[in-house]
Every structure is written in structure tokens, then in C-alpha cells.
Amino acid sequence: MSIKAKVKQTNQLKGKATQQNQIVAQTLKVNTGGISLGDLADIDAGGKADGAVLIYNATSEKFELKTNVENENVTITAGLY
């Protein structure tokens, strides 16, 4: 069995398959020029504001941007300033 492909901006894959049918990537190049936090599937970036922090919401199974954290499960430990 032989599989050949390339990964480029055209979403092609370059790799090979072994006798055990495992695909081994030979080359991977990622261009991060236009990627932002909101492009990630598990991030809700709708609350972008100065001072916002990411906090995980177990109900939506996403990280959300919040400027006000109201959750009894949060502990903030700070150093000396």
C-alpha cells in the first residue's frame, strides 16, 4: 500500500503509509498570519473587552471572555506587589 500527498495552503497532505496502515507526516508547515483566538472551536470570543480573562464554562464546554468573574470554584492566588 502506498499513499503520497502534501500539506500546503491548498489543504493537501504530504506523508506515507507503512504496512500497518499508519500515516506518518513528513512535512508540516503552518502559516499563522491570520489566525486569532476566536478562530479556535472551543473559544467564545464574543466578550472581547479591555481586562477580559478566559474562563471555562462547563455547560457550554467552551472558554469564554469575561470581565467579571462570578464563580465559587475560582481561587485567585496573588504574589506580593
Image (cartoon, rainbow, N blue to C red):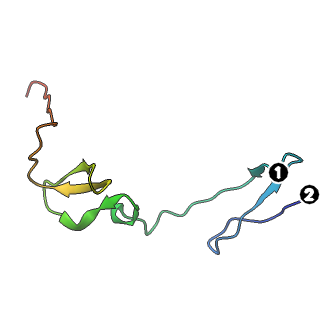
Q: Nearer the viewer, residue 8 or 60?
A: 60
> For the C terminus, which image quadrant?
top left
Q: Amino acid at mark 2?
A: Met
Instruction: Calculate the distance from the C-alpha at mark 1 to the C-alpha at mark 2.
Output: 8 Å
Q: Residue at x 78, y 48 (%)?
A: 22
Q: Secondary structure at mark 2?
A: loop
The residue wearing badge 1 is: 21
From the viewer's perspective, is residue 47 above or below residue 78?
Answer: below
Callout 1 crowding tier (Cα within 10 Å): few <14, some 14–19, many ≥20: few
Q: Nearer the viewer, residue 61 or 6?
A: 61
Residue 43 x/y as whole percent: 33, 59
Q: How many marks?
A: 2
Q: Amino acid at mark 1?
A: Asn
Find the residue positioned furthest to the front: 59
Q: Residue at x 40, y 62 (%)?
A: 41
Q: Secondary structure at mark 1?
A: loop
Callout 2 crowding tier (Cα within 10 Å): few <14, some 14–19, many ≥20: few
Q: Residue at x 43, y 69 (%)?
A: 34
Q: Nearer the viewer, residue 59 or 78?
A: 59
The residue wearing badge 2 is: 1
Answer whether labels 1 and 2 touch (C-beta < 8 Å).
Answer: yes
Relative placement, left or right, of 39 versus 74 is right
